[in-house]
Image (spheres, rainbow, N blue to C red):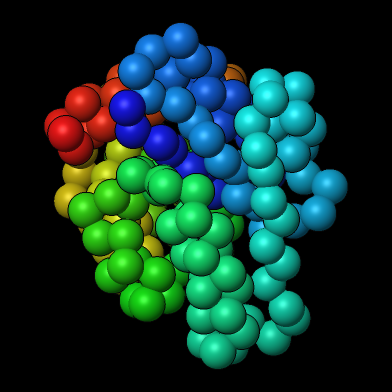
Amino acid sequence: MARVAVLASGSGSNFEALAKALNGGPHSVALLVCDKTGAGCLDRAARLGVKSLVVAYAKGGTPEVRQEAERTMTTVLESSGIDLVVLAGFMRVLTPLFVNRWKGRLINIHPALLPRHPGAHGIADSFASKDAELGVTVHWVDEGVDTGAVLAQRSFPRTPGLTLEEAESHIHSLEHELYPQVVLSVLDGLG
């Protein structure tokens, strides 16, 4: 049985989809790590009975500050027996120190079809691009920003009159469907 930690910064809809998908199976979401006090994902974790931890990044964003937060996260992840770290809207660029420690056990979901539109505004950037298809990517995390090897993608065609809000809704639906499938596949392969 593998234990998963989810790192999130926001409302936690992908966290909840993962926790519900793994509930009752051989694997579990054992921990939520959040970088923002009061984020919605913390409420979801409490409701779902998943242990949570807030690791605040001090102001400044220097590599030293980020590394201190990541050392704290790594200590907690290791003491919790975590096998896989899953990013779900975690809005921090992880340092090589953290990425290398969890290499091969660190995945992310991105709301665009990589390698196009990496970064924090994937949905808006892909929508503004007029790409014929929009979608999501699940990928391994490496030292770059959304540059890791792709595990899976799912897309849908842009339709005439599609609004940004409709695109966002469709993308989130795809995320909630695809991410748990890929995470389960990765977990089954860890053994």
The C terminus appears in which quarter of the rendering? top left
Instruction: Give the quarter of the image for residue 185.
Output: top left
Percent x, y of residue 83? 34, 44
Q: Nearer the viewer, residue 137 or 156?
A: 137
Q: Nearer the viewer, residue 162 or 96?
A: 96
Q: Nearer the viewer, residue 154 or 149?
A: 149
* Residue drawn where x is 74% and y is 39% of the image: 42
Compared to residue 30, the image places residue 104 above or below, namely: below
Outermost residue, right side = 38
* Residue drawn where x is 51% and y is 65% of the image: 75
Instruction: Give the quarter of the image for residue 99.
Output: bottom left
State left or right for residue 124 relative to residue 36: left
Compared to residue 28, the image places residue 69 above or below, namely: below
Compared to residue 149, the image places residue 171 above or below, namely: above
Percent x, y of residue 158? 39, 22
Percent x, y of residue 108? 38, 46
Q: How many marks?
A: 0
Q: Is residue 168 visible?
A: no
